[in-house]
Image: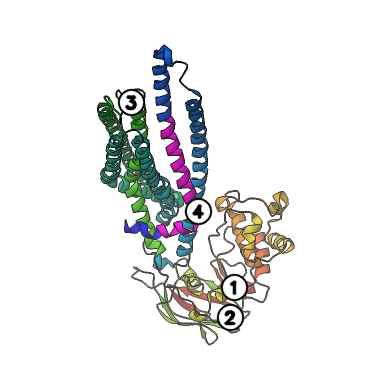
């Protein structure tokens, strides 16, 4: 339960909407109980009045029938309003939580994330965050509504027989305490299995999608599909177990409802209050007893999912509470060369260093190319400059200012990184370009697109075209050129490029490099190709994490 405490604080900004949702849930539940109770008494009283000729004309059926219609309308309207309000509040809560999760995740370096894989992080951000909607929709709101409804039932029955009211309220309160404990224990294991199997299946699917080429080349597709099927069967098994607990809870509630009804009928058969025999009031007591268990059904179901919710919160907390080891200073950007002296760096758990004894200087406006075989440490060097990783030893500085003393805004504002994999966000083409320069106008955006050969994309649908999740409507080359257009728009004075033209045709590659390498920015260009090297001031050769030429 301690894992849920940090998330309860997120309720505070939405307490008005959540309170209104709980109030509407109470109104809905009380109207439902009142409708069934009044309807049962009305039918019994009408039948009883019709049996005696002398009382046929004395029975006033207008008030009860009006009450039935009013409660029916009230229940329908309140249920609709409660669904709208409570779900709106829940969606706002989940939005805040997902935003908080992303803000906590974004500053973390790969070293901070430890062994968390992409599929696991995706599962936590999507499935685990969604699971926390149980906390309000299935737990807090039904529990508070049930308590108020039980009190209302007690008040209603006490108007006719306080002893019966006390007994019924005692039974309901006892079940409200005992049943959640029982079904929490029954649902704890399958709830934990459900969370783990969901995470496992998502991880296996992400691995399969991300490594299809490698799996096909090395003959691992069949084994990976087998793992996916096993993960799917584990998920289905957890769902079946949790469904059995749900069925058991419903069956037990029906059985307890029947036993309670028999007990109440037995005690009220001879007398209700001072009325002997009880007459139509017996039907009222019977239907109140039947309807009162409607308050217990969602509560019992909520606690069987509680362990699943607690486990989801337990998986979210480590990310939300993980401090970033990446610390920035408060110094602004200054003019001067970027120098690396004696830089050593190794990835966690790796027996071999990625970089060893690196000495390099990048003067203002200088263009330097880093060439070498795959795995020689070129990309690792860029990751140190972008502060994705921290060097193990050595000095990295801007002029006489240590690199780590730069403020984050100064570093991000002056250093532009073009990675091998360009991420296209789910939004319009304009929004994806404005990430590089928020204040750019349409003319600047169009010029950048034209410079990277995306005139056709611009002419077809314009800047407001929707690119979809991950740029699914774009080809791989178009997505890469959007990354290059961002680099052209970025106002920074230092440009770091990691294989930026991989996959582009020769004409586009020459045109883009001519544009990127003719401005006044300092450029560190990682490549294994010969295109553009004639425009460089220096070409630095790397082998096995060392600079062997061009230093």
Specify start and end residues of the magenta stretch as a single range: 8-36
* Vertical side of 17 occupied by 286: above or below: above
Q: Residues within 10 Å of mark 4 (few under 14, many from 20)?
A: few
* Circle 2 or circle 4, nearest the eye: 4
> What residue is disc 4 on?
16
How much space separates mark 3 and mark 1, taking CA atoms? 78 Å
Disc 3 on helix, strand or loop?
Answer: helix
Whether residue 345 can be seen here: yes
Side of 285 relative to 424 (left or right): left
Residue 262, horizontal then vertical, whole percent: 26, 27
Q: Residue furthest right?
A: 443
Count the numbered circles shown. Answer: 4
Identify the residue at horizontal 42%, vertical 29% (top origin). Answer: 38
Per the image, the residue denoted by label 3 is: 282
Give how far across and how far down residue 172 sits, in percent. 30, 39
In which quadrant of the rendered image does the N terminus lie?
bottom left
- Residue 413: which disc? 1
Magenta segment, prevailing SS (helix, strand or loop):
helix
Q: Is 478 rendered above or below residue 408?
A: above
Q: Earlier in the sequence, mark 2 or mark 4?
A: 4
**Percent x, y of residue 548:** 47, 78
Q: Earlier in the sequence, mark 3 or mark 1?
A: 3
The reply to whether dot 2 and dot 1 touch (C-beta < 8 Å) is: yes
Does the magenta segment cover residue 473? no
Q: Report the disc number at residue 108.
A: none
Q: Residue 148 sits in which quadrant?
A: top left
Residue 505 seen in the figure: no
């Amino acid at each position: 339960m301690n894992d849920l405490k940090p998330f309860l604080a997120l309720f505070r900004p939405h307490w008005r909407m959540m309170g209104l949702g709980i109030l509407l849930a109470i109104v809905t539940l009380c109207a439902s109980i009142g409708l069934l109770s009044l309807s049962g008494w009305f039918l019994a009283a009408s039948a009883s009045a019709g049996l005696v000729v002398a009382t046929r004309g004395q029975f006033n059926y207008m008030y009860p029938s009006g009450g039935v219609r009013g409660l029916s309308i009230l229940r329908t309207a309140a249920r609709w309003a409660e669904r709208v309000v409570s779900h709106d509040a829940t969606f706002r809560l989940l939005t805040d939580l997902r935003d908080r999760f992303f803000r906590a995740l974004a500053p973390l370096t790969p070293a901070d994330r430890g062994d968390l894989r992409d599929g696991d992080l995706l599962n936590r951000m999507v499935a685990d965050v969604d699971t926390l909607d149980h906390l309000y929709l299935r737990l807090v709101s039904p529990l508070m509504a049930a308590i108020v409804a039980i009190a209302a039932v007690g008040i209603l029955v006490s108007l006719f027989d306080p002893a019966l009211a006390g007994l019924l309220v005692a039974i309901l309160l006892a079940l409200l305490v005992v049943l959640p404990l029982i079904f929490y224990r029954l649902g704890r294991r399958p709830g934990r299995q459900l969370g783990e199997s969901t995470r496992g299946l998502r991880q296996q699917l992400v691995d399969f999608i991300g490594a299809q080429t490698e799996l096909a080349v090395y003959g691992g597709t069949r084994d990976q599909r087998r793992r996916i099927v096993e993960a799917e069967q584990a998920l289905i098994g957890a769902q079946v177990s949790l469904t059995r607990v749900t069925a058991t809870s419903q069956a037990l509630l029906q059985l307890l409802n029947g036993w309670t009804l028999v007990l109440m009928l037995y005690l009220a058969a001879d007398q209700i209050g001072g009325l002997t025999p009880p007459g139509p009031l017996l039907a009222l007591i019977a239907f109140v007893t039947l309807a009162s268990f409607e308050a217990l059904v969602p509560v019992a179901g909520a606690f069987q999912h509680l362990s699943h919710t607690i486990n989801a919160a337990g998986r979210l907390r480590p990310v939300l509470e993980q401090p970033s080891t990446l610390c920035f200073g408060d110094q602004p950007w200054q003019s001067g060369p970027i120098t690396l002296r004696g830089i050593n760096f190794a990835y966690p758990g790796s027996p071999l260093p990625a970089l060893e004894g690196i000495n390099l200087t990048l003067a203002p406006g200088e263009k330097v190319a880093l060439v070498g075989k795959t795995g020689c440490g070129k990309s690792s060097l860029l990751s140190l400059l972008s502060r994705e990783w921290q060097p193990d030893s050595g000095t990295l500085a801007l002029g006489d200012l240590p690199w780590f003393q730069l403020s984050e805004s100064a570093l991000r504002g002056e250093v532009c990184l073009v990675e091998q994999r360009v991420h296209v966000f789910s939004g319009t083409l304009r929004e994806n370009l404005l990430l590089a320069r928020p204040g750019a106008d349409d003319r600047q955006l169009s010029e950048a697109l034209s410079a990277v050969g995306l005139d056709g994309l611009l002419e077809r649908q314009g800047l407001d075209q929707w690119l979809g999740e991950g740029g699914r409507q774009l080809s791989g080359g178009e997505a890469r050129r959007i990354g290059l257009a961002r680099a052209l728009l970025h106002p920074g004075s230092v440009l770091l490029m990691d294989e930026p033209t991989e996959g582009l045709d020769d004409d586009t590659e020459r045109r883009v490099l001519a544009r990127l390498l003719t401005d006044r920015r300092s450029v560190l260009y990682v490549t294994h190709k010969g295109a553009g090297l004639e425009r460089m001031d220096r070409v630095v050769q790397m082998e096995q994490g060392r600079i062997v030429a061009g230093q």
